[in-house]
């Protein structure tokens, strides 16, 4: 692979298969981008308790998917339990990518304007919003979060603080990928790094902690939660994209 570049480089680090369209869009704007996935995602077996949540899906008033992989794994598991989807459930997803598999399965899915946990909390109906007090919450309302192992905790904690009955399905795990040799070779030209989760940044740190000035690179992140985590690691040049989708990310990178 050739690593000779005359322009500052952007590194796209999403899981395999999630970077190519963004790389093409950046190239059309004259921005060079390399694809170095930090993590891959693999489905995991559910526990007996988690399987019970699927069989009792009709007991939930809300199902919220936090990623496209969570949606895909949920469908694979739930469709074996439910030949026809139960009625009366409101589905939400963080972003178009997370919503798409559910929509393709015939479900109606609401999407917040900003594709982050914070955006979702603001977009949910008033009974679930930041404006509602715990005393106004309806304890019988059950919420099922579809996610990966670890992952986002803000949403579950915020909903539980309002006395909602929140259950999480951890449907996949993130596995770190080996550092590509090309990263060292293009390090001096590398300017901007896309980071979409705390786990991704941890893997990035594993890759680059021995390289010079890694904390001085420019980091594009979708949310304040991730930005604050990166700041705690000594990085200060951070741009919020306001969402993990391609359009938000492209706009943030192109504005540099």
Image (cartoon, rainbow, N blue to C red):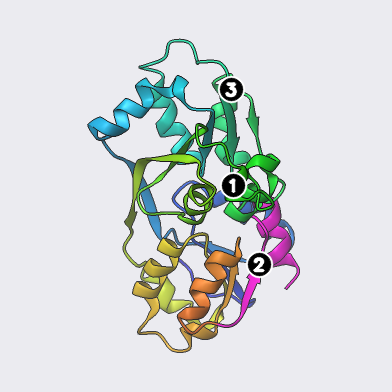
In what element is the residue under mark 3?
Answer: loop
Q: Report the disc number at residue 164.
A: none
Residue 32, percent from left and from top:
62, 66
Q: Residues within 10 Å of mark 1 (few under 14, many from 20)?
A: few
Q: Report the disc number at residue 107.
A: 3
Image depth: mark 2 or mark 1 in front: 1
Q: Is residue 77 left or right of residue 196?
A: left
Q: On the image, which quarter does residue 72 sit in?
A: top left
The C terminus appears in which quarter of the rendering? bottom right
In what element is the residue under mark 1?
Answer: helix
Residue found at x 50% / y 74%: 230
Q: Which residue is mark 1?
A: 135
Residue 37, percent from left and from top:
44, 58
Q: Between residue 11 and residue 181, name the one nearer to us.
A: 11
Q: Which residue is mark 2?
A: 240
Image: magenta residue range: 236-256
Q: On the image, which quarter does residue 166 sit in?
A: top left
Q: Is residue 237 left or right of residue 39?
A: right
Answer with mark 2 or mark 1, whichever residue precedes in sequence. 1
Q: Verify CB contact (< 8 Å) between mark 3 and mark 2.
A: no
Task: Relative to 72, say whether 39 is above or below.
Answer: below
Image depth: mark 1 or mark 3 in front: 1
């Amino acid at each position: 692979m050739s690593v000779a570049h005359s322009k500052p480089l952007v590194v796209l680090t999403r899981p395999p298969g999630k970077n190519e369209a963004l790389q093409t869009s950046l190239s059309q704007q004259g921005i060079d981008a390399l694809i170095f996935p930090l993590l891959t995602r693999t489905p995991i077996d559910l526990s007996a308790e988690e399987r019970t949540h699927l069989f009792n899906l009709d007991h939930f008033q809300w199902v919220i998917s936090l990623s496209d992989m969570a949606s895909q794994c949920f469908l694979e598991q739930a469709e074996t339990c439910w030949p026809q989807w139960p009625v009366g459930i409101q589905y939400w997803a963080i972003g178009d990518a997370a919503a798409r598999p559910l929509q393709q399965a015939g479900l109606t899915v609401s999407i917040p304007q900003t594709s982050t946990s914070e955006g979702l909390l603001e977009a949910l109906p008033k009974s679930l919003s930041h404006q509602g007090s715990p005393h106004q919450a309806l304890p019988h309302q059950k919420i099922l979060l579809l996610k990966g192992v670890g992952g986002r905790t803000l949403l579950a904690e915020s909903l539980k603080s309002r006395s909602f009955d929140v259950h999480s399905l951890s449907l996949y795990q993130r596995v770190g990928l080996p550092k590509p040799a090309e990263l060292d070779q293009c390090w001096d030209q590398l300017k901007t790094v896309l980071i979409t989760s705390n786990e991704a940044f941890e893997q990035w740190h594993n890759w680059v902690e021995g390289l010079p000035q890694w904390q001085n690179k420019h980091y594009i992140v979708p949310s304040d939660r991730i930005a604050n985590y990166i700041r705690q690691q000594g990085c200060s040049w951070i741009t919020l994209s306001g969402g993990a989708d391609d359009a938000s990310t492209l706009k943030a990178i192109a504005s540099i």
